[in-house]
Image (spheres, rainbow, N blue to C red):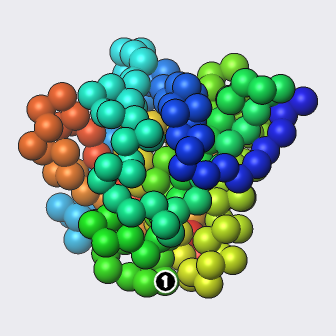
């Protein structure tokens, strides 16, 4: 039986035990109509399968406090017994978090992850609802979400949650050679 609870920053080392991986079998290619003036179409395209570890090269959740003041953040976890199997982090009103764009009414879904064996069982759905509910309870009007075009399950998940794709940045990762081919997708969810 899966249980859910809000946790605090002292639980971030436990949060880090949850893998943050996706098995990539397709990506959304961006097709520009009339060089973008006529809009864009996202076309799901098969790719040679590979596993992407979103934590690769990162220090992990336990180090977020070294970068940011976490006073206006919330953390949620899913447990199978005592084993952590999912987590979500949401940030608001934090200087230095560029995704917040200086807005006092905006939250950012900083992180959401579910262990492979627990995906497509409603764990991510419940964590997302908890994060959005917390943000709404803080009087915030929107939640901003970032993902990449090669995380097709995330793209479909955020769309299913009612988020609106609002930005496509083909050059967001240009200075990171390993990720240069990825496209940043920014979603907004009205709370």
Residue in front for this viewpoint, 28 or 36: 28
Q: Label 1, secondary structure: give it.
A: loop
Image x and y of residue 179, in percent: 22, 34
Question: In this picture, is 183 found above or below 142?
Answer: above
Relative to 32, is 52 on the left or the right? right
Question: In this picture, is 86 found above or below 164?
Answer: above
Kindly indicate the quadrant of the structure image that contains residue 131: bottom right
Relative to 95, is 26 on the left or the right? right
Residue at 23 percent of width and 64 percent of height: 36
Relative to 129, is 37 on the left or the right? left
Residue at 32 percent of width and 64 percent of height: 97
Kindly indicate the quadrant of the structure image that contains residue 52: top left
Question: In this picture, is 134 found above or below 138?
Answer: above
- Can residue 36 be seen at all in this image of the molecule? yes
Residue at 45 percent of width and 61 percent of height: 70
Image quarter hosting the N terminus:
top right
Residue at 69 percent of width and 77 percent of height: 137
Residue in front for this viewpoint, 34 or 73: 73
Question: In this picture, is 59 found above or below 111?
Answer: above
Residue in front for this viewpoint, 128 or 6: 6
- Can residue 113 be seen at all in this image of the molecule? no
| Residue at the spot of label 1 | 105
Image x and y of residue 113, in percent: 57, 37
**Which residue is most to the front?**
10
Image quarter hosting the C terminus:
bottom right
């Amino acid at each position: 039986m899966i249980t859910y609870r809000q946790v605090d920053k002292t639980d971030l080392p436990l949060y880090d035990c949850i893998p943050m991986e996706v098995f990539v079998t397709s990506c959304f290619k961006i097709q520009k109509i009339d060089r973008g003036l006529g809009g864009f179409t996202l076309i799901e395209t098969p790719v040679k399968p590979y596993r992407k570890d979103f934590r690769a090269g990162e220090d992990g959740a336990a180090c977020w406090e070294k970068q940011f003041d976490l006073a206006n953040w919330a953390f949620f976890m899913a447990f199978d017994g005592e084993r952590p199997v999912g987590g979500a982090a949401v940030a608001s009103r934090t200087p230095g978090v560029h995704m917040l764009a200086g807005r006092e009414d905006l939250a950012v879904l900083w992180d959401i992850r579910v262990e492979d064996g627990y995906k497509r069982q409603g764990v991510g759905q419940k964590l997302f609802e908890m994060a959005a509910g917390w943000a709404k309870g803080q009087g915030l009007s929107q939640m901003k979400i970032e993902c990449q075009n090669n995380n097709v399950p995330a793209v479909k998940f955020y769309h299913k949650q009612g988020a609106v794709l609002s930005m496509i940045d083909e050059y967001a990762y240009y200075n990171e050679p390993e990720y240069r081919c990825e496209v940043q997708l920014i979603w907004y969810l009205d709370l």
